[in-house]
Amino acid sequence: MRTYDFSPLWRSTVGFDHLFDLINNTQLPEINDNYPPYDIVRTGEESYRISLALAGFSPEQITVTAQQNRLTVAGSKGDAGQQDYIYQSIAARPFERHFSLADHVEVVEAKLENGLLQIDLVRRVPEAMKPRRIEIGGARAGGKDAKILSATKAA
């Protein structure tokens, strides 16, 4: 495992400790484990869709969990009657796939259609965190040279 020295960046950044820790502590995904296959598509400026190919799975056999910047999709087929397969190539093994989500990304909807699980995501930044313009006032009436800072929303 590699660790990077971000100390030169700390001199010019404020509040990015979490990001640097995330980079150093993130576990790399298994290179050989590519089941189930998936796509991630940007559907809008602040919206995304994750599509997983889950042929043969029913909605009851799949769980989707969102918890603290992490999305987990897991599935397991029960042993509902062993079949006598002559040939089997449709994967039916249990799986667990993890996705790291950025701050303020929420799951909007998850649906299973035609063997594809589609999970819609959207980034909703709270109003308090959006950029705003800070106006700097000049001298007040009465000869006082006090500077006044007031926050107003940017247009």
Image (cartoon, helix red, strand yellow):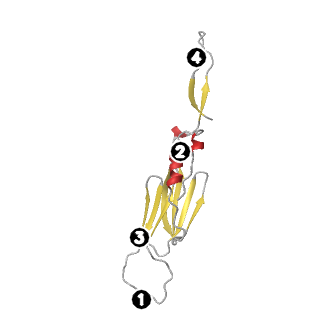
Residue 75 in picture, x, y percent from top left: 43, 69
Residue 78 in picture, x, y percent from top left: 38, 75
Amino acid found under the numbered disc labelled 1: Asp
Rendered image: mark on residue 123: none
* Circle 3 SS class: helix
Amino acid found under the numbered disc labelled 3: Gln
Discs 2/4, front = 4
* Circle 4 SS class: loop
At 61% from the left edge and 24% from the top edge, which residue is drawn?
136
Q: Are marks 1 and 3 in contact (CB under 8 Å)?
A: no
CA gap, disc 2 to disc 4?
34 Å
User: Which of marks 3 and 1 precedes in the sequence?
Assistant: 3
Residue 83 in picture, x, y percent from top left: 40, 86
Tell me the residue that label 4 is attached to. Answer: 146
Quadrant showing the C terminus:
top right
User: Which of marks 4 and 2 precedes in the sequence?
Assistant: 2
Estimate how packed mark 2 is, as few (under 14), some (14 to 19) or many (20 or more) residues with alpha carbons within 10 Å: few
At 56% from the left edge and 26% from the top edge, which residue is drawn?
150
Tell me the residue that label 2 is attached to. Answer: 125
Amino acid found under the numbered disc labelled 2: Val
Amino acid found under the numbered disc labelled 4: Ala
Tell me the residue that label 1 is attached to. Answer: 84
Q: Nearer the viewer, residue 13 or 49?
A: 13
Residue 80 in picture, x, y percent from top left: 36, 79
Q: Are marks 3 and 4 in contact (CB under 8 Å)?
A: no
Tell me the residue that label 3 is attached to. Answer: 61
User: Which of marks 1 and 2 precedes in the sequence?
Assistant: 1
